[in-house]
Image: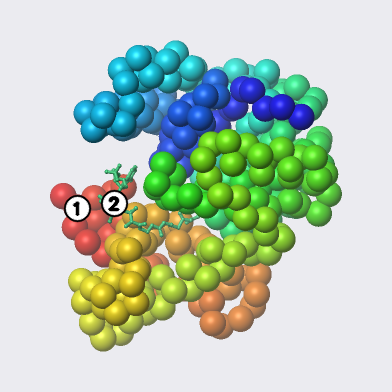
Amino acid sequence: MEIKKVGVLGAGTMGAGIAQVSIEAGYSVVLVDVVPEIVEGAINRLDKAWAKAVEKGKVTEEAVADYKAKLIKSTDIHDLNDVDIVIEAVVENIDIKKKVQKQLGELCKTDTILATNTSALSITEIAAATNRPERVVGMHFFNPVPVMKLVEVIPGVVTTDDVTQAVIELAKKIGKEPVLAKESPGFIVNRILVPYMNEAANVFYEGIATAEEIDKAMKLGAGMPMGPLALADMVGIDVVLAVCDFFFKEFADSKYRPSLAFRQKVRAGHLGKKTGRGFYDYS
Ligand code: CAA
């Protein structure tokens, strides 16, 4: 099956990035978010990224004009009715994901693939909420989407092989390296990365070192491209905490107990870069 037109539902950081890389690979994209300000924010982000790419001589102004012509923005989910795949990137909440996926199943063409960009949630549970569980698949991108090469592809228990294969091919066409993972909380990357960030938050909470020292230590002592607390700020501390809570519940193992530092930051509304404050101050 050939994918020509891509729909992206949810125009936050991940959705905007997914729309960007899909357009740059030549796909027409319908980008939808019910909140008009979020759609406009995504458009601004794309405009800035493309202006910077022109400045650096990476693309021509003509190419950017072509990108912009390939992008349809909307606040109406029904505008996704004729796309070949929807990559849903709404908030990381199982009830919201199930609700929007059910809606997508009702309004999209019968053969549209419904992909979900989830950090850790069950693809099978999301799929079961729709009228086409065999066409629902996990497609997990990483932040920042234009830079990170990986896409985890996660079939649910009834996802058909042609759907999995189509998504693997799509990931390759948009310049990513797909890795197939079986369904399990956090798949591969977050199963390993989130407990690492959680432990860094524990080290911070216990006062063993400052955020700067912890991050410096992991960059210079373990070769990480950025420190774990700066990474938590970039991903969003609320997102990291949600994944920790999910692991703790699913595995019922104390090794996944969320750090109190995460909880305290979320209670204070210090969610990281997006709110201007997390482990660091961005104001
Ligand atoms: N959006 C788009 N492009 C960005 C970017 C962003 N947010 N941040 C950096 N870049 C681009 C820069 O423009 C630059 O591009 P050019 O080479 O074309 O100039 C390039 O990336 C390198 O940037 P910098 O030199 O400014 O900085 P850097 O070399 O330190 O790289 C980084 C920045 C890519 C973020 C790097 O620090 C890194 O790889 N960090 C780890 C990121 C990571 O682990 N991500 C996964 C998070 S977990 C996740 O996403 C899963 C989940 O479900 C929670």
At x 82% / y 44%, what residue is drawn?
160
Residue 100, placed above or below residue 192:
above
Tag 2–tag 1 contact (CB < 8 Å): yes
Quarter of the rendering occupied by the N terminus: top right
As rendered, which of 119 and 71 lies closer to the eye? 71
Dot 2: element: helix
Residue 128, image x, y percentages: 78, 46
Q: Which mark is residue 273?
A: 2
Give the Cα separation between the discs numbered 2 and 1.
Answer: 6 Å
Locate residue 170: give its quadrant: top right
Other-residue count near label 1 (Cα within 10 Å), few / some / many at <14 / 14–19 / ≥20: few
Dot 1: element: loop
**Residue under label 1:** 282
Locate residue 240: give its quadrant: bottom left
Residue 216, image x, y percentages: 23, 73
As rendered, which of 36 and 203 lies closer to the eye? 203
Residue 129, visible in the rendered structure: no
